[in-house]
Amino acid sequence: MTEQAVSILSYLFVPGDSARKMEKALESGAGALILDLEDAVGPDAKGAARDLVAAFLGKPAPMPRLVRVNALDTGLTEADIAATAGAGPAGYVLPKAEGRDDIEALSRLMDRHGAAAECGVLVIATETVRAVRALLSQDWSHPRLTGMAWGGEDLAADLGASANRGPDGHYHSPFRFARDAMLFAAKSAGVAAIDSVFTDFRDEAGLAAEAETAAGCGFDGKLAIHPAQVAPIHQAFTPTDAQIDWARRVVSAMAQAGDGVARLDGKMLDRPHLKQAQAILKRAEAVDGGRRQDPTARPQRAQP
Ligand code: COA
Ligand code: MG
């Protein structure tokens, strides 16, 4: 996985037909922007949105910008790419992706329209029943793939489910299953694992809880739909000082022990703890590198 992909903690969706929101997004402090040509843009506004997105990409920005195209079965994807590839997006986001063949099909369209070799692909990989099955049966890795994300809205429609969350706000089990399958597929492909959007953008506590759960399970970042969601997401995905301290002590205790096992605070440590500690330190370093380029980012929390 590229250092760039793991250091991006938040991906802010911005409707591609709103010049105002695209301008506002520049000051959001988001790790990356996803300029949307799909669900946030009505059928009659697609053409104008492509032109707006291409013009916006032509101007400088403090973060990478990706473009979400319309799904491959809409007949709109190629025109989305044709209108924007020359403007040099950092990547494309493919909704309703159902496997590696879809990534390859998108990649061919990108090649045809002159997208750079470094232009990546982030897939939304749980939007159909077929996609979720493919997460478990296929290797999704591809030279252009930089990340995988999940979403429960379109999946609910495809499943015929009337709700994806219960009254307590937690996802029902088929949706947790899809999330988990995506996490395993992303880790197996060695790309960033991105948690879904939290649509109730006024509920900061709910967002923070969901983001912390995702970070604790191994996700690398989270999708956002509103600038106010960026700071709570960054906080949830940034290792705390206490975690960093623990990780440093584990690395040093394991180095001193020399053989496979060590003791720390009365607990046994072995290889999995060392791997966990190294991952925390790597993430802390990646996040810190990202923060140096991001003057609006909040300071780190002092305690877990
Ligand atoms: N990106 C950039 N700026 C945004 C933004 C976003 N995603 N969402 C809101 N803003 C801006 C608004 O323009 C507003 O600034 P302004 O008053 O100076 O114009 C400010 O942030 C506060 O917005 P607020 O009034 O709280 O929300 P809203 O009612 O304007 O917008 C949504 C609410 C949900 C419509 C909006 O957040 C949005 O468009 N989100 C992205 C939707 C999307 O792309 N969905 C597809 C993926 S699921
Ligand atoms: Mg959708």
Image (tube, helix red, strand yellow):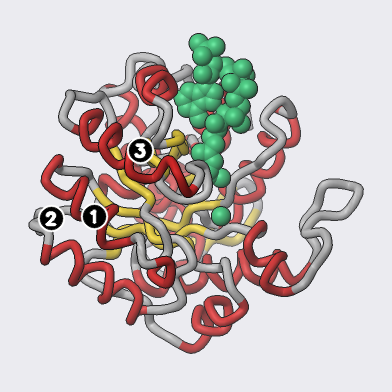
Identify whether 294 is placed above or below 166: above
Q: Residue 154: x and y, percent?
A: 63, 62
Give amino acid for label 2.
Answer: Ala
Residue visible at 41% across and 19% down?
Answer: 20
Q: What secondary structure is found at the residue carrying circle 2?
A: loop
Between the residue at mark 1 and the residue at mark 2, the CA separation in whole angstroms equals 8 Å
Q: Residue furthest bottom?
A: 137
Residue position for label 3? 49
Give amino acid for label 1.
Answer: Ile
Identify whether 170 is placed above or below 78: above
Q: Residue 5: x and y, percent?
A: 31, 49
Q: Is residue 38 visible?
A: yes
**Which class describes the residues within 10 Å of circle 2: few (<14), some (14-19), or many (20+)?**
many
Q: Residue 25: x and y, percent?
A: 40, 23
Residue visible at 42% across and 27% down?
Answer: 18
Q: Please say if the residues under marks 1 and 2 sit with CB atoms less than 8 Å apart.
A: yes
Q: Nearer the viewer, mark 3 or mark 1?
A: 3
For marks 1 and 2, the one nearer the N-term is: 1
Which of the 4 image quadrants contains residue 229? Answer: top right
For marks 3 and 1, the one nearer the N-term is: 3
Quadrant observed for ligand 1 in the rendered image:
top right
Residue position for label 2? 115
**Which class describes the residues within 10 Å of circle 3: few (<14), some (14-19), or many (20+)?**
many
Give amino acid for label 3.
Answer: Ala
Identify whether 98 is placed above or below 183: below
Q: Which mark is residue 81?
A: 1
